[in-house]
Image (tube, rainbow, N blue to C red):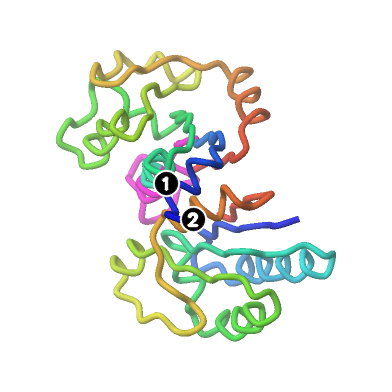
Amino acid sequence: MPTGWCLLSNRKSWLITLAGGAPISAGDPDGTDRAALQAGLDLALAAGAFGQRVTLVFAGGGVDLVTHIADAEDPLYRLLGSAPFYDIDSVYVLDGATSQGAFRDDLHVTAMSHKEWLAAAGEAHVVINY
Amino acid sequence: MEISLIIRTPGTAPNQCERIQDFIQSAVNQGHEIKQCFFQGAGVSAAVNNQTLPRWRQLATLTGAELLLCSQAVEASALSVPEPFVIAGLGALVEAAVNADRLVSFV
């Protein structure tokens, strides 16, 4: 039996939050761990590719990836732009981070309150923070 | 209960690696089953360093769990991969997460 079919037959909901993790020495000067953002985004896209329902939330240092002011040539920024091809049609930004500027217009970006985030975490089968 | 792990703890934090290994041992002692440990990002260095490797080998024998190193991380760090570790892609992690009762992430 093909693995992909197997996974589609066992579809779970995933909540992946990209915040850039804890600051590490290898991270950006602003303390964002870009390796964590990359790892989390890669996993989100892989889960989407295998037919999983992925809710992708940005917080902290991850919010830059969904704002207009980010560097559009940044590989991570561009990678995130491919999310709709992995059936991730909407991404969310935790409230409080929404004041950082207008969001990129190639993705459907929606604000999510902390209460909604907690509720989503309670309902998801797989919850991972990066 | 079937448990899979994502391990992103860097090898520069040996105490944290030891706690992960203790977690696995305790889970098995309590009758749980460890299906897979997926080492992602900086976690691959926690897998293959000389300090932690002997106990990973013991735990692999004890649990029968797959010990998988993220292919991207291995490629980026140009590590050689000792047994019983195996290189795998994120698809293996997704599959394990779907099939496990719990996915536990260590940072």
| Mark drawn on residue B93 | 2
The answer to whether mark 1 and mark 2 are in CB contact below 8 A is: yes
**Can you see residue A21?**
yes
- Residue at image x 35%, y 77%? B79
Q: Secondary structure at mark 2?
A: helix
Quadrant housing residue B16: bottom right
Quadrant, the C terminus of chain B: bottom right
- Does A114 sit above or below residue B56? above
Quadrant, the N terminus of chain B: bottom right
Q: Secondary structure at mark 1?
A: helix
* Front disc: 1 or 2: 2
**Does B73 sit left or right of B62 as displayed?**
left
- Residue at image x 49%, y 64%? B39
Would residue A123 be counted in the magenta stretch? no
Residue A101: x and y, percent? Answer: 31, 15
The foreground one among B11 and A29 is B11
- Does A27 sit above or below residue B22? above
Question: Which portion, as a residue range, is magenta?
Answer: A17-40
| Mark drawn on residue A72 | none
- Does B91 sit above or below residue A40? below
The foreground one among B37 and B19 is B37
Residue B2: x and y, percent? Answer: 70, 57
- Residue at image x 49%, y 80%? B49
Residue B52: x and y, percent? Answer: 58, 79
Would residue A33 be counted in the magenta stretch? yes
CA neighbours of label 1 inside 10 A, class few (<14), some (14 to 19), many (20+): many
- The residue that label 1 is drawn on is A43
Disc 2 residue type (three-letter): Leu
- Residue at image x 53%, y 71%? B67
Extreme right residue here? B30
**Can you see residue A32?**
no
